[in-house]
Amino acid sequence: MSTTNSSTMALREWLVSERPLSRWQASLGRFYVKWRDFAANKLAMVGLFIIISLLFIACFADLLATHSPVVGDLKSARLLPPSPEYWFGTDDLGRDIYSRVIYGSRITLFVVVLVALTAAPIGLVIGTLAGYSAGWIDAVLMRITDIFLAFPKLVLALAFVAALGPGIENAVLAIAITSWPPYARLARAETLAVRNFDYIKAVELIGASPFRIVLRHIMPMCLSSLIVRVTLDMAGIILTAAGLGFVGLGAQPPLPEWGAMIASGRRFILDQWWVAAAPGLAILIVSLGFNLLGDGLRDALDPRSSDQ
């Protein structure tokens, strides 16, 4: 036991060493310090647990679901309340709501991941280019950004989906198109803060191209703030996707999308409350998890907070 404790202490001392012997040791040390700060935040750990649970449920939905998410028993299982057989009850087509919520986690994760992988890089590229180039390039890119920011995100997403046609793929594309402007603004602000740093001037003096400076030296400085902002925006992305599904422009039947499930259950909200309550509670829990995780990442990755 003492040997294990001594090994753990030696590893900890190696990670937090003020004189790392290699770049790999320095990177691991920074990660360990950030993780230690993050783990000290109990609410952030709750958010991390919720998101890990979402990933687990989405990956093993086939094993966790008790019934088919699209085929129901319309004759004998229509609008049944929660019971040992149907944990969350059934909907107006006799489908098991629990199984539909479980499979709906895959659609939610699909939307969130694709929007984040699409909108965040677009905003990062536009913001860093605008901040480093300045002049007319900055003016043009930021005016385009202002045009997108002038409209509410959900209204703009509705307009794009109406033009592209209903469907989960078009919904993802519409949400991504409306989500990149805040990331561009954030990346531009970070770029304006670091473009006059001494190491950037040194790289310019040795003849590095603007493309290399932006890609290798400025974009990495913006990543931590961008990751925090993306995590905090996940809840808004989920709500936007649910809003599109609620009005029939997102995932189409019989896909078990949470917003569409709420829309179909609003007709029975007074008597059969469980039809809309289960997907609504799922949206609430997942959105809360992303918000708690984003708050924890912001506190852990913000260098100003660690200096206080």
Image: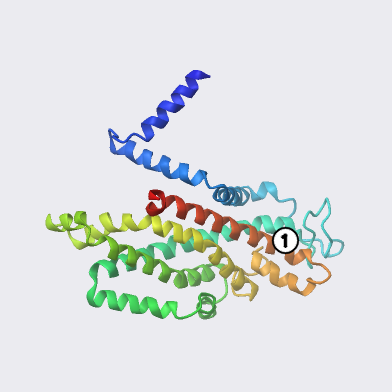
Secondary structure at badge 1 equals helix
The residue at the far right in this view is 76
Q: Residue at x 29, y 39 (%)?
A: 23
Q: Residue at x 59, y 49 (%)?
A: 46
Looking at the picture, how far across and down is residue 236, in whole percent?
A: 54, 66
In the displayed structure image, the side of residue 11 where residue 77 appears, left or right: right
User: In the visual, does 59 lie left or right of 185?
Assistant: right
In the rendered image, the vertical position of residue 32 relative to residue 232, given as above or below? above
Q: Residue furthest left?
A: 206
- Front in this rendered view, residue 79 or 43: 43
Question: Dividing the picture into quarters, in which one does residue 275 lie?
Answer: bottom right
- x and y percent of residue 34 in the render? 43, 45
- Please tell me which residue lies in front, 4 or 244: 4
Q: What residue is rendered at 39% in x and 78% in y? A: 146
- Percent position of residue 262, x then y: 70, 69
Q: Is residue 239 left or right of residue 36?
A: right
**Amino acid of disc 1:** Ala
> Which residue is located at x 42 percent, y 69 percent?
182
Residue with the mark numbered 1: 278
Label 1: few (<14), some (14–19) or many (≥20) C-alpha neighbours in 10 Å: many
- How far across and down, in percent of the image, does residue 164 sit? 51, 77
